[in-house]
Amino acid sequence: MVSKILIIGACGQIGSELAYQLRAELGTENVIASDITESNMALVKSGPFETIDARSLGEIEACIQKHNVDTVYLMAALLSATGEKYPEKAWDLNMNSLLNVLNLAKDKIISKVFWPSSIAVFGPTSPKTNTPQRTIMEPSTVYGITKQVGERWCEYYFNNYGVDVRSIRYPGIISWKTLPGGGTTDYAIDIFHKAINEGHYDCFLTEDTALPMMFMEDAVKATLDIMNADADAVKIRSSYNLSAISFTPKQLASEIAKQIPDFTISYNPDFRQKIANSWPNSIDDADARQDWNWKHSYDLVAMTNEMLLQLGKQAVS
Ligand code: AKB
């Protein structure tokens, strides 16, 4: 039987691409996209769409019953930079949406859950380089706190209620279809748009701020790989470290300049620098590679080429 999927937060950067990919694989009618508003018209028009506030258990449950959903991808969240501006809103959305979905799985109304965690679970006291799966985690952002608590809830619901919840700690995700919103790693997407349209980028991080990153194709593949893995293979039920590339704004700018020689960059760090400073430079994801055969495809050069190609096409059309 084909799985019937609900994506909550489907208008966002990762949710929209998951919706397109899952629809291609399972059939458009089997993937229900939802969000609090119709903020991504291309996605809204591409198949079944429901307006849902992820904080409302009733709204989620009604949609699940209406469409006979068995699997939920919960992609709604306030990210790190926005979370620092609206801490209580971040806590409310990020925590209550997760507990709603976990409780629906506990009550057997759905059978499987994907929930994204983030490198934001780590903090200033975590090892910076090749940050291990299990280590000191003292996140200093509200977003990181919600992800850390969320991980503990996922593990708790698995251990105590047998909820089949799967999760990965996304690094910064780089993509060209849908803009990100409110993250600290967003610079690595803004830079491409500004390079193509204006030839200059004023970066809100310092030139030497190394952060873990990943191209969207790899992020979608990882998400579907862990969801399709045998339950026994998914040994970590909090969340898996996941890694692909790690680079600084300066390294990314010089890669872009290979194709746009007049491109210039300036550095004006703002409040997001402190967030970036608290996160790892690179991640050790040996468990994901071993347990469910995770492997990334895009390095810095391949990712930069694809971003410039796709955004260049958009600019001329
Ligand atoms: C953010 O920057 O807040 C996110 C993340 C790393 O989870 N992209």
Image (cartoon, rainbow, N blue to C red):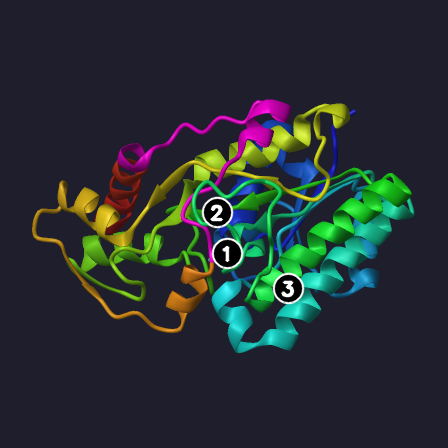
CB of mark 1 within 8 Å of CB of mark 3? Answer: no
As measured in the structure, the alpha-carbon distance from the residue carrying label 2 to the one carrying label 1 is: 27 Å
Q: Is residue 187 magenta?
A: no
Cα–Cα span, label 1 and label 3: 13 Å
What is the secondary structure assignment of the residue under circle 1?
helix
Q: Which residue is mark 2?
A: 171
Q: Nearer the viewer, mark 3 or mark 2?
A: 2
Q: Residue shown at 92%/47% (left/top)? A: 107
**Location of residue 176 in the rendering, given as x and y in whole percent from the top left corner:** 37, 47
User: Dot 2 lies on which element?
Assistant: loop
Q: Is mark 2 within 8 Å of ligand 1?
A: yes
Question: Which badge, 3 or 2, is on the more N-terminal residue?
Answer: 3
**92 to the left or right of 100:** left
The label number, if any, that marks residue 36 in the structure image = 3
Mark 2 neighbour density, 10 Å: few (under 14) some (14–19) many (20 or more): many
Which secondary structure lies at badge 3?
A: loop
Task: Tell me if residue 107 comes above or below residue 148 in the rendering.
Answer: above
Instruction: Give the magenta part as a residue range.
Output: 279-302
Q: Position of residue 310 (x, y in %)?
A: 30, 41
Q: Amino acid at mark 2?
A: Pro
Horizontal and vertical percent position of residue 63: 78, 53
Residue 23 vertical placement versus 16 (above, below) = above
Residue 300 is a magenta residue:
yes
The answer to which of 25 and 137 lies nearer the viewer is: 137
Q: Which residue is mark 1?
A: 41
Where is residue 32? Give x, y as percent: 68, 45
Q: Is residue 188 left or right of residue 84?
A: left
Disc 2 or disc 1, which is closer to the eye? 2
User: For the point 50% across and 37% down, which residue is it?
Assistant: 284
Query: Which is more toward the observer, 108 or 20?
Result: 108
